[in-house]
Image: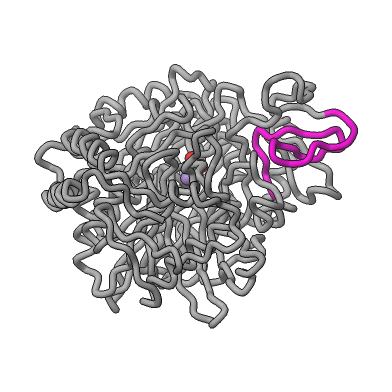
Amino acid sequence: MAMQNQKVREWVDEMARLTKPDRIVWLDGSEAENRRLLAQACESGELIPLNPQKHPGSYLHRSDPQDVARTEHCTFICTEKREDVGPTNNWLPSGEAKTLLKGLFDGVMRGRTLYVIPFLLGPRHSPFSKVGIELTDSLYVAVNMRIMTRMGEAALEELGESGDFIKGLHSTGNLDPQKRYICHFPEDKTIYSINSGYGGNALLSKKCAALRIASWLGREESWLAEHMLIMGIENPQGEKIYIAAALPSACGKTNLAMLQPDGKFKGYRIFCVGDDIAWLRPGRDGQLYAVNPEAGFFGVAPGTNFQTNPNMMKTISRNTLFTNVAMASDQRVWWEGLELPKDGEILDWQGRLWDPTLGWKAAHPNARFTAPIRQCPIYAPEWDRPEGVPISAVIFGCRRSTIVPLICESFHWQHGVYLGATMSSETTAAAAGAVGVVRRDPMAMLPFCGYNMADYFDHWLRIGRQLKRPPRIFRVNWFRTDEKGKFIWPGFGENIRVLKWIMDRCHDKVDCLETPIGRLPLLQDLDLEGVGVDPAGLRQLFEVDPEEWLKAAEEQTEFFSLFGTRLPGELLKEQEFLVARLRSRKGEHLPSV
Ligand code: OXD
Ligand code: MN
């Protein structure tokens, strides 16, 4: 590939002097090159070819067993001043971090190939878009990046002669978990990642560039980088709106983004623009516009099947890279949630012979697939629109077994920002550590915001002031459980009922019930016929217990106090209003259905 850009050349040379690879290969993203890289990865054992009839163009990768999820404790934001990253991020002073990383990267690519991967985040010729270059010694990363981004020539053409690009240096090193570092230098738009090959740690375009570095750039340039899906929804009357929804990792963003309405909701159509990351900016007309910076899905495999997500099953039917799933003896992939093959053997995610009596899962709970968005049967061509799509509703979703009702609408933008900022959710297998622990996860961005979250809340408020027609903001919780620990709401395709209400609210077609925590649906407006939730379940799904919420408000105060005086006063005001509204309704159980 002809590499004209002097700035890129100089940086690649500098990083090569540091890492000392045997070879440097510039990737152009072409089909022929991809075939070559895949063949090489099969030869080296990094990829295992799957059954060409069942999974054309698809491969399995088994990672190191110690390297299976994002490692938040090894993830750092490195700046001059600690207060710029705030109390929720790990911080290293940039000078110290650079010295440490130079030592770790010195000679790390000896005997290896350094791949130069130019990538474009966002559509071509779009004011939203950013160019990045990732340097990596991992073939697995290279072939994943081609799916996840607009990679190669397109990125370099967009860059032209400019030196304005996000720089990412990655090496799998020796995978030593004690020396694993994922370091971000937002002041230099640079990322260094070493000793992990896992998606979120190693595909630097994703969490590192499109969220942590981008969120910092967004604050400087007046836009938002969010952990959000983007979807279109069209009702049987042909009216269409776009929704952006934030949910923590492994809480169903991918399933929601390509929901398949069934039965009486067949007349509704969903269009998938993105499943994980949204970049949002105010348009000249005062509406909020969104693009998906990515070009593929890096989704959680276990639990994905034709009932939970038929569109994803079709998306991953070809040209897909699977990581840490199990494999049947006919080279077919398998994971928990799919039907067990009737005969033959199963190898678990580490390649060990497995059967269901062994007491462990065959696929790793955070096993993934990487597949191109264009293969999604309900892919929205608007994905490539330079101006993005106008957003009518923003959803903040959490995973809470108690207290948070199925759906609630904020009173206004400021209250919506408060709802997002006070989100808490139970942890999942997407990050290393305990699963099921409730933690604060504002806007589902706790692991991904590249700067002080107090400033981030303030930035959300500022963006709201720029909008003449701000989206409505909602909070959802699909995960409330009954006394036996069973999910009350069936979720998946049935979530269309909640989306319909959101859409009706956006079109001012239905009223609502004002409660101290926000606006709840009037039950007659929420089409619940045939949903299979009994009256007791419904009561729980929409219950607002002022006592419980007063306790929750106290915990929120504790969280807010972490930020000291940097926290925007508007959020403290919202907190005071909430407490006052709750006190006035103490002793009542709201609403009664
Ligand atoms: C992801 C995550 O991979 O959120 O999208 O962990
Ligand atoms: Mn994610």
Does residue 153 appear to the left or right of 331 in the view shown?
left
Residue 390 is covered by the magenta coloring? no
Measured as percent of width and height from the top left, residue 548 is found at 29, 39
Residue at horizontal 52 percent and vertical 32 percent from the top: 429
Magenta part, dominant SS: loop
Q: Is residue 223 something one can see in this rendering? A: yes
Q: Is residue 347 above or below residue 582?
A: above
Residue at horizontal 52 percent and vertical 31 percent from the top: 69
Measured as percent of width and height from the top left, residue 487 is found at 54, 42
In this view of the protein, which residue sits in the foreground, 282 or 583? Answer: 583
In the rendered view of the protein, which quadrant contains the C terminus? bottom left
Q: Is residue 10 something one can see in this rendering? A: no
Q: Is residue 291 above or below residue 365?
A: below
Residue at horizontal 46 percent and vertical 30 percent from the top: 436
Q: Which residues are magenta?
A: 318-345
Q: Quadrant of residue 219 in the image?
A: bottom left
Residue at horizontal 62 percent and vertical 62 percent from the top: 260
Residue 319 is covered by the magenta coloring? yes
